[in-house]
Amino acid sequence: MAITLKHLAVYGPGLSPAVVSFDGHRTLIRGPSDTGKSHIWDCIWFLLGGTGALEQFPESEGYDSLELAFLHDRHEYLVRKAMAGGAARVLVRLDEIWVADGAPNSLEDVAQDLGELLVELIGAEGKKVLRTRSEKGAITGDDIRHWALLSQPGMISRDATKGKGHGSDKRVSSYSLFLSGLDDSAVELYKSSSIKDQAKGKLAAAESEMARLEGVIPVDTNRASTVAALAWVDERLDMFATQLQARSSVLKELRQKIAAEGDALTTASAQLASATSMRERFALLDLKYSSDLARLGATDEGIAFFQALAETPCPLCGTPVEQHVDPGNLKPRAPTKYRDAIAAEAEKIRELRRGLQPSLAHEKARIVTATADVQRLTASLEVLEEQETLVLRAAGQEFDGDPRELAESHTRFSSLIDAFDEVDRLKGEIARLEQETKQKRTALVRNVGSHGDEVGAIARQMLNDWGFTSIKSVYVDPAACDLVIDGRRRLSYGAGKRGLFLSAMTIALMQHALKEGHPHLGVVVLDSPLKAYAQKESADNTDRDIPTATVNASFYGWLSRFKGPGQIIVLENEAVDPATARALNAIEFTDDTRHGRQGFYPPRTVIAPPPAPASDGTEFDDFA
């Protein structure tokens, strides 16, 4: 699951690339100060996800891009990034790196964040670590780098290995993951400050509501007496409902009869009105017939009188009457014809009048019958309505309480019981919220089992091989993420031993993790692990009991024999025996331009002055 660094290269237009290749197990890059060794460490950190800008110096002028190649299984990955910063471009050769003709397979872009890719490659995908005691998150590339790359300042620092401030909690979690293989998925989180603030707000609201309810409940009232009073009211209301139902049944029957009698009275009244109307119409028609007969009689009498008159000339002009009227009307038969017509018309009217009398008599009979029905039904309705009135009056006398008062009492007692219940509920809620606002803090003790002892055993053997043969016990303090050597904390030793002991722990952690199949980068990069121990003038090296030459020779000899698991890259100032250097195939930097490799960057005839310091004060991110 680990990766293996292959080479680091820096490129610039028109300039020779600066390249350093890494052995699959151990690489020593040795040389004096200011030859670019620490810069190599910076570049590896930068290309593995570090975000701070690289420090510029005269030898790096003109170079603008970096490349880090590493292997994972049978795949080769290239990480390319501008020296000025920005996003990294990641490429991969899929399938086998080499084909039959010896040419490498083509590169393909990886559409994935570099940090996420590293987490996936080392087998830590999906692992959860504590960022704080109230927040979990995924392990990140920063956690991986922190426990794999040791800078020169970090070697001798008196700060805890987990670092300071923000991020220290998750580094302890990631250390435990590399050590034991177990993440923090099962760890229960503390409530965050925002959740506690919300609980405090809910607590205040609950207390305010309970105070309001206690003000509503009378002082001399309890729930039991209120329940009893409500039961009495319910009993009275049930009696009221029973009586009301009985009364309603009687009233229903009476009102059905009243409705039936009312419908019959309406029908009878309609019939009476209809018969009365028809009688009046028939009587009016009879009067018309009588008037017509009188008119025809008068006309007949006039014609008879005309017949009896003698013919006389006009008294005014003396002319005969024939000259003034139609002569035909003066004939004797003409008046007779008029009278015969009148007589016939009168007979027809008399016949119609005789036919009208039966109809008039029928309507009179209907009026009599309808009048009797109306009178009978009206009397019946009056009786039924009196019965309804008696029933309603009797029902009012049956109840010994006011239904309205009973209903109001029921509402009041029910509200009081609800208030008692709500107070009980609020008491429980307040107790719960008080616990939420006062959550007890407990120490987090991760069960690393025997893994700490195994890492300690590896580190002790390593330190014995480096010349510290007097060390008898080494074990890991998982809470401090550090070693305890012969009963002393690592940070209690001088700077030289602090650096070497931290190197031993970092390498031992890598070897143990890879052996057990735990997540780990699989690479350890050490910047100057021997330098601090060799500084005799340092006031912090008072406990240097093993000669520097012995430690240097032992360390380099051990490194030349190292075959894994894992990969170690050491950047160091201290001289190495030529035979050991050949066994290590060490990369030697020299500040002598006449021979050897003059540092990381190829030499140039003219070196430009260093660039001006950055105005924004940007510094490299935390290397420790």
Image (cartoon, rainbow, N blue to C red):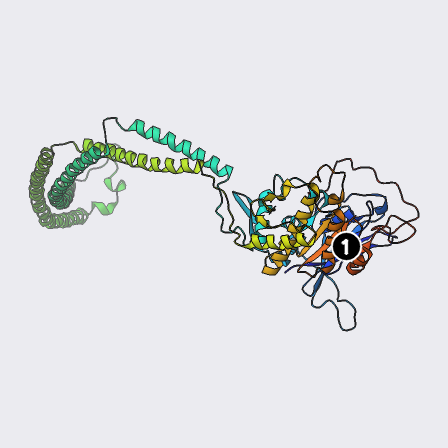
Q: In this image, 550 relative to 599: left or right?
A: left
Q: In this image, 368 relative to 617: left or right?
A: left
Identify whether 265 is placed above or below 70: above
Identify whether 442 is placed above or below 460: above
Residue nearest the viewer, comparing 47 with 370: 47
For badge 1, the amino acid type reads: Leu
Whole-percent x and y of residue 144?
A: 64, 51
Whole-percent x and y of residue 116?
A: 63, 54
Residue nearest the viewer, comparing 34 with 8: 34
Whole-percent x and y of residue 31?
A: 82, 49
The answer to whether residue 209 is visible is: yes
Q: In this image, 571 relative to 300: left or right?
A: right
Kind of element beneath mark 1: strand
Binning the other alpha carbons within 10 Å of mark 1 as few (below 14), some (14 to 19) or many (20 upward) gives many
Quadrant of the frame with the N terminus: bottom right
Whole-percent x and y of residue 62?
A: 85, 47
Which residue does the numbered mark 1 point to in the structure image?
Answer: 28
Q: Residue furthest bottom?
A: 100
Residue nearest the viewer, comparing 26 with 548: 548
Q: How many numbered dots are placed on residues in this image?
A: 1
Residue nearest the viewer, comparing 206 with 336: 206
Question: Picture quarter containing residue 373?
Answer: top left
The answer to whether residue 113 is visible is: no
